[in-house]
Image (cartoon, helix red, strand yellow):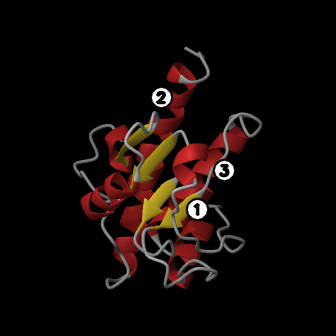
Amino acid sequence: MFVCLGNICRSPTAHGLFAAKVEQAGLSGHIQVRSGGTGGWHVGDPPDERSVRVALERGIDLSHLRASQVSSRDFHSCDYMLAMDAANLADLRRMAPPAYPGVLDLFLTFAADSGYREVPDPYYGGEDGFQLVVDLIEAASDGLLQHIRRHQLGQG
């Protein structure tokens, strides 16, 4: 599960992009992809139109996604809870059960040498911010897929 604040920019972009990579790798039967926000004010809304447009330029369709809010149930059904920034990670840590056995971390932990620790929130910025988000998410998605293949699926 990919997590940001409102689940309309960063986390749905990660959701759509990572799901496409999983499908391309032939692993859709093994890996389920979800996203959510720590806040609930956008529940049911589609992703931000700028996120949809920038992702579509790269061949990823986000238009079918709808915002949801992270709940305690997600910790029981998700092996990875990956936050876009430190504030989201802190919120997730407060919500997590004491013995959560999964990976609870920043998503960019899986991006090799991105120069960023967090995926910046592009909401109040311009088009360049949305392009950067996709670049960072793509790098982290490649690293995450490699990690899952190695540690969860025993593939190399």
**19 or 81: which is nearer to us?**
81
Measure how far apart labels 1 and 3 are at the Cα level: 11 Å
Dot 3 or dot 2, earlier in sequence: 3
> Tag 3: residue type?
Ala
Dot 1 or dot 3, earlier in sequence: 3
The residue depicted at 25 percent of the width and 58 percent of the height is: 86
Q: Quadrant of residue 134?
A: bottom left
Nearer the camera: disc 1 or disc 2? 2
Q: Which residue is mark 2?
A: 147
Measure how far apart labels 3 and 2 are at the Cα level: 17 Å
> Tag 1: residue type?
Arg
Whole-percent x, y for residue 128 in the image: 35, 74
Q: Looking at the image, is 4 positioned above or below residue 145?
A: below
Q: Which mark is residue 124?
A: none
Q: Is residue 47 rendered to the left or right of residue 143?
A: right
Dot 1 or dot 2, earlier in sequence: 1
The residue depicted at 51 percent of the width and 57 percent of the height is: 72
Q: Which mark is residue 20?
A: 3
Q: Secondary structure at mark 2?
A: helix
Q: How many C-alpha atoms fall within 10 Å of the one at disc 1: few (<14), some, or many (≥20)? A: few
Q: Which mark is residue 58?
A: 1
The residue depicted at 61 percent of the width and 83 percent of the height is: 45
Q: Secondary structure at mark 1?
A: loop
Nearer the camera: disc 3 or disc 2? 2
